[in-house]
Amino acid sequence: MTVSPDLPLPPDAAFDAWFGGLSADQRERLSVFYHFMTGRTFDDFFLAGPAALRRFEQLRAAPDFPLRRVARLLQIRSTFSFILLAARDSKYLPQFPPSLLPLASSLQADPHWAQVGVSWQRLCDFVLNDDFLADWLATLHADG
């Protein structure tokens, strides 16, 4: 894939770098929420941290055709944005099931989550925004 000078890393690699820069606990928590919110089977609702992280990393890295790679990042972007918004806004907390409330509450209590939210917003604004993702998709099709 050709990467433009305006885009030092393709969006999927930029996401992977951002996600890999989080602590193991943060990656696990985000993965648990992601699977709870997007899972298709009953078992997805009860994945523990390490299992949720493994499954999320497998999902993220799975090869696919260009449009589905972009769609996967759009789903991750929207879900993580909602999760990190819940960390800042207590009006969402009562909507979480009781089993996830301690996990959701910890997002508000830990000041490191505020930093994660800021870095996430920066990544979304500059790399995971619609224009960059559309350009990336065009590049993927051109290289395909």
Image (cartoon, rainbow, N blue to C red):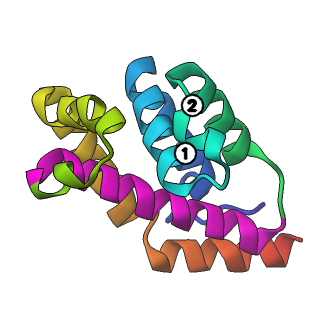
Q: Which residue is mark 2?
A: 47
Mark 2 crowdedness (10 Å alpha carbons): few <14, some 14-19, many ≥20: some
Can you say which quadrant of the picture contains the C terminus?
A: bottom right
Contact, mark 2 vs mark 1 (Cβ under 8 Å): yes
Q: Quadrant of residue 113?
A: top left
Q: Which residues are magenta?
A: 65-90
Q: Position of residue 60 (x, y in %)?
A: 67, 46
In the displayed structure, 99 sits above or below 23; it is below
Q: Nearer the viewer, residue 94 or 62?
A: 94
Query: Of helix, strand and loop, which mostly describes the magenta segment?
Result: helix
Q: Position of residue 22 (x, y in %)?
A: 40, 28
Q: Which residue is mark 1?
A: 35
Asked if residue 12 is among those painted magenta in the image, a careful observer would answer: no
Image position of 37 (left or right of 117): right
Q: Amino acid at mark 2?
A: Leu
Asked if residue 71 is among those painted magenta in the image, a careful observer would answer: yes
In the displayed structure, 123 sits above or below 5; it is above
How many numbered discs? 2
